[in-house]
Amino acid sequence: MGKITFNKGNLSATVLKAMSIFGGVQVITIICSIIRTKLVAIWIGAVGVGLFGLYNTAIEMISAITQLGMRQSAVRDIASASPSTMSRIIAVVRRWAWALGLFGAFVTLALSPLLSKWTFGDDSHTLGFCALACVMFLSSITGGELAILQGLKRLRRLARASVWGVLVGLAVSVPLFYFYRIDSIIPSIIAYTLATAVAAQFYREKEVKSDSSLTAKETFDMGRGFVVLGIYMTISAFTTMLISYIFMAYLNNCAGTATVGHYQAGFTLVNKYVGLIFTAIAMEYYPRLAQANGSNMRTSAFVSHEMKLVLWILVPVITLFITADDLIVKILYSAEFEIIIPFISWAIAGMIFRATSWCMAFVILSKGDGKIFLLTEISSALVSLVLNIAAFNLWGIAGLGVAYIVWYFIYTLIVWSVFRYRYHLTLGRGIMHLIGYALAMSIAAALLSTFVGWWAAAIIAVVATFFTARRLLLQR
């Protein structure tokens, strides 16, 4: 077998372009969400924010269960389809999206009296939940179209659909909030979902036509693969959320609600905001891996390249984050949350292992190995629960940062074992050295920031930025 070669410079440029596009998309989405919540708070008040949160939580829960993770699982089948079967798989995805959307709407309608009682303690909001049934249908159709765009690597159209959806959704919601106040909550949720659905339909794939000749049996058989994978992903997500809830409940009982708030704030800073990098890159990386699924050499080469690129990008991000952690906390939260700085200063170093495991874990999804994906994710969640409880009892809130590092180190070992021994894949040269460099720079910045001052950590950040810029320029 010959050595697999590809133009690293072109691939790196493609990945960086995708990261910049979808990083921007997520920033716009977050800003729109903040504005939306702020306007509800100003014009409707705390009751409006509460209603908004309760309705959206119920919607997200039902959507996660009834849509079976199709938004992610279908990408694999689309990306790996041959040109001769592409029109058929696109038709299958669209039909399944409609079927699951109708199923979600039916479940919402059937459960609306119970949802009202569970959420509000009476049946006064039953009609409200009935009205939200259309949201299930619209979001499922939208998810199907976005999965098709991602699988076909129509990344610019995918980005435009996402951006215009949230922008128009916000624009439509604002006058509703202003004129109808508390009565605007449900109409605004429907309008927002409708805007995203219209945007997805406007930018939907038109070059590859759906095959309308498929029978119901063919649609079921061809879609069974991504639906089964989606079921495993749904069970995994539910189990992970449940274990996270168990730890939050434990923390609330033994340390109080304020500590839960501090932990949640720190975890969001580290896991979600920095994690935007991973989400942005995955838009291009996931379908590329699915296309290379038949070749172990190409898969190994792509994983190694992605891992190196992500680690090079992360090192300056992490060191800059550590340098400015106090400022970031004050801007995003308040001085009251300075207690979380030791937590985020250490947890952010764990992003090195998160990046390493993340690049390998996508191989499991690209191969459609649902059982192994479920096993690895549940193992990860259980490890995090044990480590968090032990570390908090030993070192308090700062100990949770140490637990984050150890958690992702163990998860990396778990995923690497699957990567190496189940799929017989290998990592390229220099990966271990790069991981060592990234850890050394991150830990050095954390130590200097803690015991010397932010200016000392800033030196590490400048050096890391220089080396990353030099490395990326050499690959051009």
Image (spheres, rainbow, N blue to C red):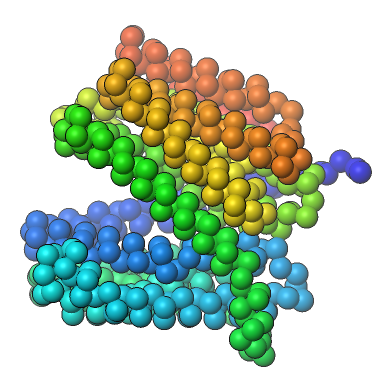
- Which residue is found at the position 38% from the left and 67% from the top? 63
216 to the left or right of 113: right
396 to the left or right of 17: left
The percent coordinates of residue 406 (x first, y second) are 47, 25
Q: Give the quarter of the image for residue 84.
A: bottom right
The percent coordinates of residue 34 (x first, y second) are 25, 54
Q: Quadrant of the C terminus?
A: top right
The percent coordinates of residue 224 (x first, y second) are 61, 71
Q: Nearer the viewer, residue 335 or 99?
A: 99
Total numbered labels: 0
The percent coordinates of residue 315 (x first, y second) are 51, 28
- Which residue is found at the position 49% from the left and 38% from the top? 380
Q: Nearer the viewer, residue 332 or 266?
A: 266
Q: Give the quarter of the image for residue 80.
A: bottom right
- Which residue is found at the position 11% from the left and 70% from the top? 122
- Which residue is found at the position 47% from the left and 58% from the top? 234
> Looking at the image, which residue sits at the far right?
1
Residue 172 in the image: above or below residue 471: below
Q: Nearer the viewer, residue 30 or 187?
A: 187
169 to the left or right of 26: left
